[in-house]
Amino acid sequence: MAITVLKRLFVGSPLATAQAKHERLGKIAALAIFCSDALSSVAYGPEEIRIFLALAGTAALAMTVPIALAITMLIAVVSTSYWQTIHAYPAGGGAYTVAKENLGTLPGLVAGASLLVGYVLTVAVSVAAGVAAITSAFPVLYPLRVGIGMLCVTFLCVVNLRGIRETARVFAVPTYWFVLGIGVVIGGGLIHLWRGGPVPEMPAVQSATLVPLTTFLVLRAFSAGCTALTGIEAVANCVQAFRPPETRNAGITLIWMAAMLGSMFMGLAFLSDAFNILPREGETLVSQLAAQILGRGPVYLAVQASTMIILLLAANTCYAGFPMLSSLLAKDGYLPRQFASLGDRLVYSNGILILSGLSMGLLIAFQGDTHALLPLYALGVFLSFTLSQLGMVRRWARLRESHWMHHAAVNLLGAFVTAIVLGVVGVTRFVEGAWMVVVVIPALVVMFYTIRRHYVEMSRQIDVYGYRPPKIGRHPVVVLVGGMNRGVIAALTYARAISPNVTALTVDLDSTSTARLQMHWPEWAPDVPLVVLDSPYRSVIQPILQYVDKMEKQRDGDYMTIILPEFVPAKWWQHLLHNQTALLIKAALLFRRGKIAISIPYHLGS
Amino acid sequence: MAITVLKRLFVGSPLATAQAKHERLGKIAALAIFCSDALSSVAYGPEEIRIFLALAGTAALAMTVPIALAITMLIAVVSTSYWQTIHAYPAGGGAYTVAKENLGTLPGLVAGASLLVGYVLTVAVSVAAGVAAITSAFPVLYPLRVGIGMLCVTFLCVVNLRGIRETARVFAVPTYWFVLGIGVVIGGGLIHLWRGGPVPEMPAVQSATLVPLTTFLVLRAFSAGCTALTGIEAVANCVQAFRPPETRNAGITLIWMAAMLGSMFMGLAFLSDAFNILPREGETLVSQLAAQILGRGPVYLAVQASTMIILLLAANTCYAGFPMLSSLLAKDGYLPRQFASLGDRLVYSNGILILSGLSMGLLIAFQGDTHALLPLYALGVFLSFTLSQLGMVRRWARLRESHWMHHAAVNLLGAFVTAIVLGVVGVTRFVEGAWMVVVVIPALVVMFYTIRRHYVEMSRQIDVYGYRPPKIGRHPVVVLVGGMNRGVIAALTYARAISPNVTALTVDLDSTSTARLQMHWPEWAPDVPLVVLDSPYRSVIQPILQYVDKMEKQRDGDYMTIILPEFVPAKWWQHLLHNQTALLIKAALLFRRGKIAISIPYHLGS
């Protein structure tokens, strides 16, 4: 069929289960896939700090570098904590697994919900920021940003439905290109300053009403900058995607990543301060800085392009994380089973589709504006950090391996620091949008429990032990007759074959044709009694359901079969020319116990 | 169920077939229902004439009154023709019936297609013009016009699903209120002029480039004004909706209508010229004229409100005409059968829904702009006029009743005049949008023929004579098994009851659980062989279909039954927690001959 051809074209041929092992990643490719989320945060992190400081006027911008230093230290602490997690959980230590195993089900589910929310937001934020990098270079595209964002998500969705290794191959180069590009910007800027080159004047702050530089505002700027930490946990979640020795490779990749992230973040924050760059609508801070240092030539364009691409890679990280986490949750019964199974390209297709749909919804709702999306972002991420680190502390205390006190201390520091940041983010960004996350995470947790209760209750109800099989008895079969035709004759033949107790049923919609049917009936089916039902309101369905319910009390055995003769046209559009009454009758019967509806198809030629 | 409650609340309780006769209309009510379309055309007809004349500058506006006179004469000719149609076709002489009976099937279908297109356009145009009457009075609502239009169509849809007589009762007063309001405007304007009151200066024509006043431009203005004739045929289509004596009542109503329409049209055209009113964006000509004569007080607002309401009534006319015509076409096999049957409120519900959907689509596509929609409008209407009049001429010549030459001459004049207008409209408005109608009408005719061919071919194929009933033989039954549970046991019990030849089938997705199933199978169903199918690509459906197709060659008899155990959850949302694989398997089996799919439901408690 056409849909199959389309699927094969975009998604590729099916892959056999046995091919799964070959889909592992080396360190170079893994860095491109799993670290792009964290690394790309530098595209918006420093900008967010300066946006909030600028509210208090140009003097307040001097706080940029101290805040950036604090965030860089935070990066170091959190990375060290996750390095320990990788070694303790070689099978993949996502916050969900760690929190559930060590703290219990509820904290695990809270961590899982935070992570799911975080993944969706990462896709939306990264795509919005990537599009912003392009519209900074080509302002004419600015009004089209939501549409371009949709295209990007669609592209990611298709690439990921194809499977992870091919994705890595497509995307490995641009991550290093981005790191190189930011390196050139930072290097060029530092040389410029060292040589004593001129820097632009500080532009006047446009804001009509300046707010005072309170501690609260500094904390808000710090919270906003903390979005740079998002994605730092990706490596720990996906240890099993690395080539053996998985633990060692993942650990080394994490350290590389933390070093790159810290240097780029510090460098950009310092230079944006030294060059007096102020954020403005329609052009990102990185774009302004790059244009200042490199001029608006081909090198500048290359930096913007690489920024766009790494942000797409960041979004792509979530296409590994979200489906894998939702499959874990589904296997534990907290999400619908459809999320648990691999699609025919060895990826969790349903997770990929849901992630794409949700992030597209966010992009539309927030009109593709990075700055509007970011307040929702950090809260969920830091909640999962804290729970994961606390889980690790409990783990060390429980297992008491050698040096456990030392390990526990590292994770305790991580938990302590991220908990403080969590509190700061929650308080300072609540009104701006973090409240939505505060609503969504408990709602997700309730949903998880509800789903699991259904599965548990169901598996109890369908257990074969102690089940008395239904009795069939003199099984009554009713054939619905709309008029006399070949479809009805086929249905009557089938009915006689499966039971000796057959009745025909017709609804009187038009007295002339009903009379004709009754007159000729003995010629066609003398052995089957024909029952005629009245229908004062011209409904076909109601009289049939009333008859079936009435018979309920009289029948022998547990089942009653209702046979519907159905014409199957040769072409799909011809279905529109036939009444869909059979479908409605079947839907109504589905909710009545002991009723079996059978369509006997009669195939029409074209 | 909830949907039933909602339906009853908005649509009302079902009405019995026997209640149909009481739904007839008196002349007063019929005028309100069937003539509002024609009468309301004066809200945009005169305006359209002046829009086109203004393109050639203020001097050209002197042509307004001559053009309006020509259109008024056209109204007289067409009404006389239709008066004859009413008397010749007391059962309802729509263009479709008249053309089909007298000119043949193809002209009949062309007329039918033109009428359907005309009805959809009338709803869109009238609602757009009605909303314009309101936004003229309250310009603040102008940006919301598309949304208000949607609300109006939804309202009409609901009112009409309730049934026609209640509609008449709701709507009878405002038609007369509109006629009275326009009468006050015209009367007030004439008295003002007679007393020699001052008139406003002619505003300067804003257009940057004036076009010369060519014959073509005059014809364009004339074509644009001819939209005033739309709806004139409504009475003739619905003679049977009148109280007896139907013919006489309908004829009298038609004459009243023509007189009112002509006077209002002439009056508005003359006064807009005398008061130097020029159309402008955001305010209609009638609104400007009324404001000029009455001031912007309560009387002005009453006129605007009545204009809005009569235009809604005009749209409502189509809610009688479109469903009735589509039911005629459906009874003749040219449209899907679903259009032929009365809903439970004695109305053709499917026609009402389709009409609402299509006109909403037009309103959105043309952004609720009357002026943009009008070029599509007159062509289909005049095509059906011409075909209908030609059909009448043929009828008189065929039957040769007394005075037939006299009658034929009247209709010939009508045919001649409307054919000329048709040509003028087709040529002058082709580029503006009439080309769409030129594309759509033949496409509809092709669709009519295709649908009828399907029904004719089908009734030949399902004829019981000469049909050899299928053989059942040792009917093979296959039970699909996903694991061992109560649902499977119920399905096996049913399978054993309907055939001695039962096989169980399972797809190996997970080798551990498959092995466990095979081990325990003899305890549960020792009499049924269990077949295990491999699935290298983790698809459930493909291996099953391959097995079924392979068995095709081996089976005895014409049928093979596939039984699918299915869990029916207690709550609707729980369906989302179960794989919809059963549905996909059933859909795939539907297109394979001789395959009967049966779901055996196992009902879960909540």
Image: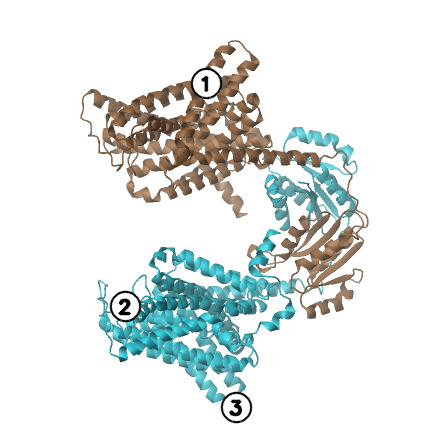
Chain colours: A brown, B cyan
Does residue B380 appear left or right of residue B563 in this picture? Answer: left
> Any mark on residue B278, and which?
2
Residue type for callout 1: Ser
Q: Residues within 10 Å of mark 3 (few under 14, many from 20)?
A: few
Residue type for callout 2: Leu
Viewer-side residue, A436 vs B457? A436
Quarter of the figure with residue A337: top right
Quarter of the figure with residue B600: top right
| Residue holding disc 1 | A81
The subunit letter for the residue under badge 3 reads: B
Residue type for callout 3: Ser
Quarter of the figure with residue B344: bottom right
Q: Is residue B138 visible to the viewer in this orientation of the structure?
A: yes
User: Residue extending furthest front?
Assistant: B298
Q: Quarter of the image containing the C terminus of chain B?
A: top right
The subunit letter for the residue under badge 1 reads: A
